[in-house]
Image (cartoon, coloured by chain):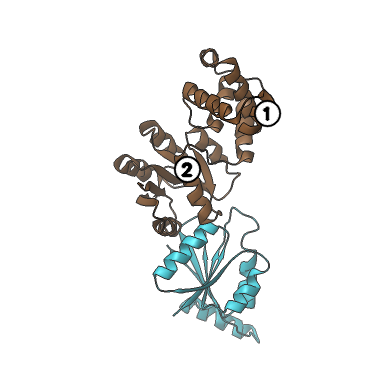
Chain colours: A cyan, B brown
Amino acid sequence: MRSVFILYENTLFARGLERLLREEGLKVVGSAMQDKQALDRIKKAEPDVIIAEVESKKPESGFLLGRLLRELPRSVVVRVSLDDNSATLYTGHRWTANNAHDLVKEILTSVSSTKGAHRHATT
Amino acid sequence: MKPIRVLLVDDHCIFRQGLAALLRKEKEFEVVGEAQDGIEAVARAKELKPDIVLMDISMPRSDGVEATRRIRQTLPAVKVVMLTILEQDKKLFEAIKAGAHGYLLKNVKPDALFHTLRGVMSGEAAITRATASKILREFAGQSGSGGGEVYREELSARELSVLQLITEGKTNKEIGRILNIAENTVKNHLQHIRDKLQVENRVQAATFALEQGLIQKKDHAI
């Protein structure tokens, strides 16, 4: 069973989403508001997927997203926002660029497979 | 006991469906329908006649403020509670003026949502002191222009005193102490004020009083 962690800004959204995901048979292993302790909790929970609610209307919102992608490069992160009905899927993986050729190769691979890039979806 | 019938209006489908899932597990609420924008909200409200509409403020096509105005005009018995991310949302003020009974922040816990819905059904305003104060300050700036003489004549001197203290942010208990009357007597006066001004709660009464220039300007904070 896929495990999910919810990183949120709005409690009502998180609690509702948690209920919906459970009804869909997913395992919600934790949730946290976006604060400094959230990252530790996510690392401890080791979810397959992290759903991160990021609100553009709140300037401080989303400060953890960059750290998530850097510190948990193997995680699948889905960024959602109540501002609109879109979701962005980040499927990152760690790689090392020893030279420009590596960099170009990775960019081309990312473009063709969306690996290492992100995709938008309308929810 | 009959459940409170709720219509959910929000363009974000996941949020809306999540809210419906939360309300569904509470026996005292029944989600009678959902709508994704203001136009659909008005149509669904006319069709379903819910007790309460939980209405997002910002939506495509027709926003929550316009939908609230239209619902309150055509279905005055239907109560509308706005949903917002930010308490500082400028449209919130417009929504209250359009007839909304209050608002809920999307970052409240489900229990607070349930509590607010119950409160609104029993005539309470779902509004924080800070926002009520802001609204009253705004109206205070426009007060005196409403030609409220007719209403002033309808209210007794004691009712005007109570109304004055309400706009100053006093609780029923505080009003009772200041006027040297029992708290229940204050409640009775408030009921008479609501009936005479045809408003539903103390915030609307105070807002109306300031708008119509029924009371003197002071440092308003409800």
Query: What label does residue B81 carry, if any?
Result: 2
Identify the image quadrant of the N terminus of chain A. bottom left
Closest to the camera, between mark 1 and mark 2, is 1
| Residue type at tag 1 | Arg
Task: Tell me whether the residue at label 1 lies in contact with that at label 2, contact meaning CB atoms closer than 8 angstroms.
Answer: no
Query: CA–CA distance between discs 1 and 2?
Result: 32 Å
Q: Residues within 10 Å of mark 1 (few under 14, many from 20)?
A: few
Q: Is residue A106 above or below residue B99?
A: below
Q: Which residue is mark 1?
A: B177
| Residue type at tag 2 | Val
Q: Is residue B5 above or below residue B180?
A: below
Residue farthest to the left, as pictured: B47
Q: Residues within 10 Å of mark 2 (few under 14, many from 20)?
A: many
Q: Secondary structure at mark 2?
A: strand
Q: Secondary structure at mark 1?
A: helix
- The residue nearer to you, when weighing B143 against B176, is B176
The answer, for residue B42, to whether it is visible in the render is yes
Chain of the residue under label 2: B
Q: Position of residue B24 (x, y in %)?
A: 39, 57
Who's the residue at 52% across and 40% down the image? B102
- The residue nearer to you, when weighing A80 against B114, is B114
Q: Is residue B126 above or below residue B138?
A: below
Identify the image quadrant of the C terminus of chain A. bottom left
Q: Is residue B67 above or below residue B23?
A: above
Q: Position of residue B169 (x, y in %)?
A: 65, 32
Residue farthest to the bottom, as pictured: A98
Disc nearer the start of the sequence (1/2): 2
Who's the residue at 53% across and 51% down the image? B112
Chain of the residue under label 1: B
Does residue B86 appear to the left or right of A21 in the view shown?
A: right
Number of callouts in the render?
A: 2
